[in-house]
Amino acid sequence: DLLTALPAAGIAAAVLGGCASTEGAVTGVDRVLSISLGQTESHPSYGSLVSFGERLAEATDGRYGARVYANNSLGDQQETVQLVSDGAIDLAVISGTQIENSSARFLPMNLPGVFDDIDHQNRVMLDDSIVGELFASLEPQMRLTVLGGYTQGSRHLYTAQGPIASPEDLAGLKIRVQESEVFLRLIENLGGVPTPLAYSEVYTALQAGVLDGAENNEISYVTQRHYEVAKHFTMTNHLVGFDFLLASTDLLEEMSEQDARLLKDAWNETQSEFVEIWKRETDEAVQQMTEQGVAISRPDPEVFAPIIEETGVSILEDPRDIALYDAIRAVGDEGSGR
Ligand code: GCU
C-alpha cells in the first residue's frame, strides 16, 4: 500500500499536515496525534478512540488531540508496529499476536485458556504488578510504549460450510489465522489447516473460496461482514484476545511531563469504560447475526476445551513465561472466588 512505501518523514507529513481538512479531521488543537486502527468505523474501538482524542484535547487545553485512521488505512498491523516504532505514526491498536511477533515475552497473554473471561483479562491488564514491566519492555530497543488496550472478547470459529460440532468436522478445512505461532498450533491441534492472512484480506479470501473459514469475535465478524461469506458460527470460546495500544516512546518523551501524564490519564479513563461497551455491543452483534440468518451453534464445551487448554499450556517453555502465566491465572482464581 502507498503509505507504507513512503519514507517515515513523508508519512508523518501526510498524516499530520495533509489531511487536516478531510473527513474525520480534528480541528482546534495544536498537535493532532495519528492513531492507526484496523477496524471499521462501526467497531466500538473506533468510537472509543475518538472519545480518547476528545478527552485528550480537553485535558490539555487543545495542545494535543487525536485523529483515528480506521480500516488499516495507514497499513496492516505488522507494518504499523514498525511505523510507530519509527515515530511515523503516533499510536496504533495492535492485536496481541502482532506484539508477540515483536517480543515473545507477550506470548503468555495470547494463549488459549490464560484468561477466564474479559473481566479477568481486564483485572490483569490494569494490574501494574503484573503488566508494568512487560509494558515498558519494548521501550529501550523498539521505542514502543504499551499504554494498555482493548479486549477482543472471546474468539470463535466460523465456516462457509458447517456446522462444526467437533474437531472431526474441521479436518482439511483451511481456516484463516492471525500471523502467530499460537494460532497456527491451535487450529492444527483442532484438526484444521491454519492459513495466516492479514485481517483486511479475510473477506475476499472467504468469498473466493480460498479459505473455508476463520475465527474471530462476534463484533469483528459482523463489522467485517464476514457473515455474508461464512454463515456458520460455532461458539468455541477458544481464546480471549487483547488489542494493545502502542505509543511512540519518542512522542511521550517529547511531550511535557504534564501532558504525557494527561495523555495516560485520558487513555486510562477510555480503557476502563470499554469493557462494558464491549459487552453491550457483543450482544448487539449476536442479535444482528440472528437477523442476518447466521447459523449459530454452541457445541458442548467439553468437545473443544481439552484441546484448547492443552495447546495453551504446551506452548509455554521459558520459566519467565510460565511465571507470567501463573501470575495471570492466580488473578483469575481470586476473581472467581475459586
Ligand atoms: C480482532 C482484533 C484485531 C485483529 C483481528 C484479526 O478484530 O480486534 O486486532 O487484527 O481480530 O483477527 O486479525
Image (cartoon, grey):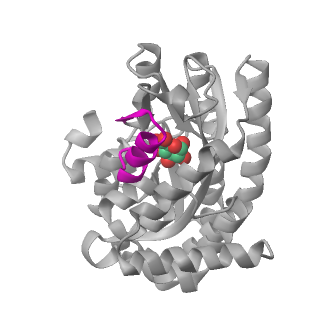
Farthest residue in the top direction?
A: 208
Q: Which residues are magenta?
A: 178-197
Q: Is-magenta flag for residue 156?
A: no
Q: Nearer the viewer, residue 50 or 71?
A: 71
Q: Residue at x 72, y 64 (%)?
A: 119
Q: Residue at x 39, y 60 (%)?
A: 99
Picture layout, residue 175 above or below residue 275: above
Quarter holding residue 276:
bottom right
Picture layout, residue 59 above or below residue 81: below
Q: Residue at x 62, y 50 (%)?
A: 305
Q: How many marks?
A: 0
Please state if 242 lies on the left or on the right of 99 as rendered: right
Q: Is residue 172 visible?
A: yes
In which quadrant will I find the N terminus? top left
Picture layout, residue 1 above or below residue 88: above
Q: Nearer the viewer, residue 130 or 245?
A: 130
Picture layout, residue 258 above or below residue 301: below
Please state if 116 lies on the left or on the right of 114 as rendered: right
In which quadrant will I find the C terminus? bottom right
Indicate the position of residue 252 as horizontal and vertical percent values.
42, 74
Q: Residue at x 70, y 57 (%)?
A: 274
Indicate the position of residue 41 as horizontal and vertical percent values.
60, 37
Q: Is residue 23 visible?
A: no
Quarter holding residue 319:
bottom left
Indicate the position of residue 243 as horizontal and vertical percent values.
52, 55
Q: Is-magenta flag for residue 180?
A: yes
